[in-house]
């Protein structure tokens, strides 16, 4: 594939996906924060002035549904007769149908009812006011949906939108939490822990705050919070879990990365952890595993160069070096694999070609070179696949049985999800399937698995808030597959810095938005200094609280309402975050995934021509 063709393909892919400008247009329209559905998305969202009125304009895709939603807390309303009024003024052009879906979310974020308000398709302005009972709802998810026709442009204009109750307009946030379970210094007790030398453990009980909760309807009697000392995580019950998901709520934090890897190191040394899964591509981890299993052909500098473009590569590289040293003295018993796929099929082909090329660095021949070249160009044949994945193949005979199975899996999944868009919208189910495959293939009875990634993926429900309630997180599928054998905890912080995308073209250190009053991070910050662990089993299902969830972009809207009890086994809190440090050269070079992939392809293609 020629370089100009590659760049054109990438440009088309970018245009097909909702861009930053569209996201800005939908961010705070009519005073509400809107989130685009990840699978059923509008082609474009912008502002428009039509008939002398400023409006939100949504373009529905031809013969496809579009969904955009906002989540509104309603737990502060009187539950005995709670009623809201929704007002919307709109007009449409060429849409098959338009409607509002109201999802009433109750205890532990369960959807207790869905109501539909049909918006008759009108080519002139039309206003609807509808009253809706929301008894027992704690959160309300309002989703604006439209289905496009076969026409080229399917447009929906919104001129006015509001949700009202008790004579006032409801917002995406409320100042105070529901009174049932507000955390404060008066309703918790802290248990501190310390470790003696060797394997002896001693629990020290603090004399601080040992009062019972006095909430009228809460099932709580006590709220024990564990204060962690000297980076010892033994008192966290989930450290004994068969499969532990450690989910960071922000990317690019050196602090949270170190906490996560220290927990994994402790599980390796004390909880028989033999498999570590990380949120990086499965294809590239073939190279990483050879390195940590002490194969001299695979060099750290190659891994560093490949990984330095990710936001948290420094902590990952430190762990990779530690794991190689550990395996040296423990018979190479611990494996580290990626649980993700490359975002582009082409990048996966580059990873596989580099793995094979490095494996046969000293014994190259024309047949292997030909297979490597076709892998690079995504053109591997059925014959190539046999040579790779069968024990008698020219490449397969030099691989372990596990490697042959994983390459077979990569090739099959790459064929199933050829397009970048498909990989992105099905990412969580792909990651879950990879985890199933690796856990069943690589672990034995009594051995444990540790997973590290974004809490958005590892929690038990969905990514973000409930505006994407039918887009389940990887952790949801893991919970369904392994029940309580899969346990997730959230890593969060009150304030500090992180390495993030400041704009769509600039990566740098960003200051985190301070945790607002009423958030779980703010509540934990007020309790005590230092690292704390809050088991969620002591929380009530009605406890809805704001919590940070920040990915790759420095979004000023960093907090969402969740039910901690429904999302994880516990919350590990660190007061302050320090950002990952990278050189300016690295920031300029590699933090654009598409540019990085093009660079890798061009370098390898040039190298192939020289040989």
Image (cartoon, helix red, strand yellow):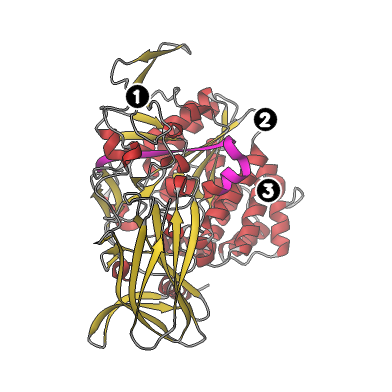
| Quadrant in the picture for residue 144 | bottom left
Query: Is residue 170 or residue 6 the one in the foreground?
Result: 170
- 425 over 543 or under it: above or below: below
Q: How many marks?
A: 3
Q: Which tag, 2 or 1, sits closer to the chain's start? A: 1
**Viewer-side label of 3, 1:** 1
Query: Is residue 451 or residue 507 the one in the foreground?
Result: 451
- 523 over 12 or under it: above or below: above
Whole-percent x, y for residue 449 in the image = 56, 35
Q: Residue at x 46, y 65 (%)?
A: 602
Residue at label 2?
A: 445
Whole-percent x, y for residue 69 in the image = 39, 64
Residue at label 3?
A: 405
- The answer to whether residue 590 of the structure is visible from this angle is no
Mark 3 Cα shell of 10 Å, populated few (<14), some (14-19), many (≥20): some
Q: Residue at x 55, y 51 (%)?
A: 431
Q: Which tag, 3 or 1, sits closer to the chain's start? A: 1
Whole-percent x, y for residue 87 in the image = 33, 71
Mark 2–mark 1 Cα distance, whole angstroms, equals 41 Å
Q: Which residues are magenta?
A: 477-496
Q: Is 35 left, or right, of 469 in this rendering?
A: left
**Viewer-side label of 2, 1:** 1
Q: Residue at x 34, y 24 (%)?
A: 212
């Amino acid at each position: 594939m020629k370089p100009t063709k590659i760049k054109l393909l990438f440009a088309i892919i970018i245009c097909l996906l909702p861009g930053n400008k569209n996201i800005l247009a939908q961010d705070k329209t009519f005073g509400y924060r809107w989130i685009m559905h990840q699978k059923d998305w509008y082609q474009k969202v912008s502002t428009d002035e039509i008939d002398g009125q400023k409006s939100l304009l949504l373009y529905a895709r031809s013969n496809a549904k579009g969904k955009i939603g906002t989540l509104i807390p309603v737990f502060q309303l009187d539950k005995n007769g709670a009623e809201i009024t929704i007002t919307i003024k709109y007009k449409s052009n060429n849409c098959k149908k338009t409607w509002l879906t109201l999802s009433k979310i109750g205890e532990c974020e369960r959807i207790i009812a869905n109501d539909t308000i049909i918006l008759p398709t009108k080519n002139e302005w039309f206003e609807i006011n509808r009253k809706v009972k929301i008894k027992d709802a704690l959160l309300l998810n309002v989703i604006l949906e439209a289905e496009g026709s076969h026409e080229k442009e399917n447009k929906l204009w919104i001129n006015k939108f509001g949700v009202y109750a008790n004579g006032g307009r409801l917002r995406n946030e409320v100042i105070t939490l529901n009174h049932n379970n507000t955390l404060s210094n008066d309703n918790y007790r802290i248990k501190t822990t310390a470790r003696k030398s060797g394997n002896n453990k001693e629990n020290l009980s603090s004399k601080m705050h040992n009062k019972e909760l006095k909430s009228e309807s809460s099932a709580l009697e006590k709220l024990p919070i564990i204060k962690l000392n000297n980076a010892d995580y033994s008192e966290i019950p989930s450290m004994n879990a068969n499969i532990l998901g450690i989910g960071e709520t922000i990317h690019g934090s050196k602090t949270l990365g170190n906490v996560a890897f220290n927990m994994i190191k402790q599980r390796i040394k004390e909880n028989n952890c033999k498999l570590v899964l990380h949120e990086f591509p499965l294809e590239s981890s073939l190279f990483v595993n050879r390195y940590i299993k002490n194969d001299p052909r695979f060099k750290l500098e190659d891994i560093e160069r490949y990984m330095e473009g990710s936001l948290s590569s420094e902590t990952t590289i430190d762990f990779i070096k530690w794991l190689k040293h550990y395996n040296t003295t423990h018979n190479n018993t611990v494996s580290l694999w990626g649980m993700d796929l490359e975002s582009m099929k082409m990048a996966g082909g580059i990873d596989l070609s580099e793995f094979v090329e490095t494996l046969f660095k000293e014994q190259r021949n024309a047949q292997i070179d030909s297979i490597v070249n076709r892998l690079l160009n995504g053109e591997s044949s059925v014959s190539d696949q046999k040579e790779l994945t069968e024990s008698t193949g020219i490449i397969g005979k030099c691989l372990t049985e596990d490697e042959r199975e994983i390459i077979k899996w990569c090739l099959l999944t790459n064929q199933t999800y050829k397009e970048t868009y498909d990989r992105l919208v099905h990412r969580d189910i792909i990651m879950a399937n990879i985890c199933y495959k690796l856990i069943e293939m690589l672990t034995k009875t009594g051995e444990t698995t540790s997973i590290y990634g974004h809490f958005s993926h590892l929690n038990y429900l969905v990514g973000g808030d409930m505006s994407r309630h039918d887009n389940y997180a990887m952790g949801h599928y893991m919970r369904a597959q392994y029940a309580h054998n899969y346990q997730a905890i959230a890593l969060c912080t009150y304030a500090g810095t992180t390495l993030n995308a400041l704009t769509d073209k600039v990566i740098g250190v960003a200051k985190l938005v301070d945790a607002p009053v009423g958030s779980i991070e703010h509540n934990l910050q007020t309790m005590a200094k230092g690292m704390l662990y809050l088991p969620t089993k002591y929380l009530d299902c009605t406890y809805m609280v704001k919590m940070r969830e920040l990915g790759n972009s420095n979004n000023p809207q960093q907090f969402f309402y969740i039910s901690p009890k429904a999302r994880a086994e516990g919350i590990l809190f660190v007061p302050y975050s320090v950002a990952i440090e990278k050189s300016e050269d690295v920031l300029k070079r590699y933090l654009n995934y598409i540019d990085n992939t093009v660079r890798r392809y061009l370098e390898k293609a040039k190298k192939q021509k020289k040989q």
